[in-house]
């Protein structure tokens, strides 16, 4: 399933994401927000944004596989982080890099980083949702 990312002239060059994705396909897949939990629901990496980001992206990959999709099919990622401030960016970026290496994926997609007051459980430091398109 071809997904092309585009950074058009006239917009600032982004760091860590793309402005646009164009997909060819007919099957739209929505992945609910994934947090850093193992199959039993135990939180992975308590208090560690790097570990939780890596695991949450890994859980997105598991959900994609269940829908017969991969990160190559992802057209949008949304990262929700409670009490966001820029001091959290290095840990978030390191977690994304760790997941990219472990999963062999390119996480550079259009998306959003949304600072929120809280998530579904107080120990969650991140939640990640995705949209993908396949044929």
Image (tube, rainbow, N blue to C red):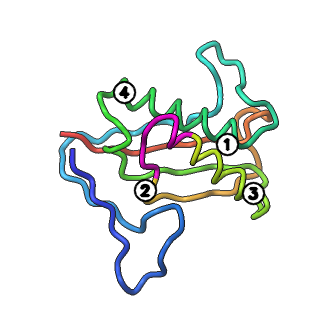
Q: Earlier in the sequence, mark 4 or mark 2?
A: 4
* Nearer to me, 103 or 63: 103
Q: Is mark 4 on a helix, strand or loop?
A: helix
- Point out residue 14 in the picture as x, y percentages from the top left corner: 50, 71
Residue bearing the label numbered 1: 126
Query: Looking at the picture, how far across and down is residue 24, in whole percent?
Result: 18, 52
- Residue 93 falls in image quadrant: bottom right
Please report contact status of discs 4 and 2: CB closer than 8 Å, yes or no.
no
Sooner in the amino-acid sequence: mark 1 or mark 2: 2
Residue 49: assigned label? none
- Would you name the residue on which mark 3 appears? 84
User: Mark 1 and mark 3: span between their CA atoms?
Assistant: 10 Å
Residue 43 belongs to the span the image colors magenta = no
Magenta-highlighted residues: 99-107
- Residue appearing at x 37%, y 23% in the figure: 66
Question: Dot 2 surroundings within 10 Å: few (below 14), some, or many (20 or more)?
Answer: many
Q: How crowded is mark 3: few (under 14 residues within 10 Å), some or many (20 or more)?
A: some
Position of the C terminus, as image quadrant, is top left
Mark 1 residue crowding within 10 angstroms, few (<14) / some (14–19) / many (20+): many
Q: Which mark is residue 109?
A: 2
Give the Cα separation between the discs numbered 4 and 1. Answer: 21 Å
Q: Residue at x 50, y 36 (%)?
A: 32
Q: Marks 3 and 2, how far apart in space? A: 20 Å
**Element assignment for label 3:** loop
The residues bearing labels 1 and 2 have C-alpha atoms spaced at a distance of: 17 Å
């Amino acid at each position: 399933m071809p997904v092309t990312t585009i950074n058009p002239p006239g917009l600032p060059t982004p760091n860590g994401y793309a402005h646009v994705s164009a997909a060819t396909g007919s099957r739209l897949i929505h992945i609910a927000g994934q947090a850093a939990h193992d199959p039993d629901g135990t939180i992975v990496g308590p208090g560690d944004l790097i570990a939780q980001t890596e695991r949450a992206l890994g859980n997105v990959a598991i959900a994609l596989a269940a829908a017969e999709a991969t990160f190559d099919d992802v057209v949008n990622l949304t990262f929700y982080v409670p009490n966001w401030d820029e001091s959290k960016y290095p840990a978030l970026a390191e977690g994304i890099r760790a997941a990219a290496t472990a999963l062999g994926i390119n996480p550079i997609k259009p998306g959003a980083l949304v600072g929120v007051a809280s998530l579904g459980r107080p120990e969650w430091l991140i939640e990640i949702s995705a949209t993908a398109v396949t044929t």
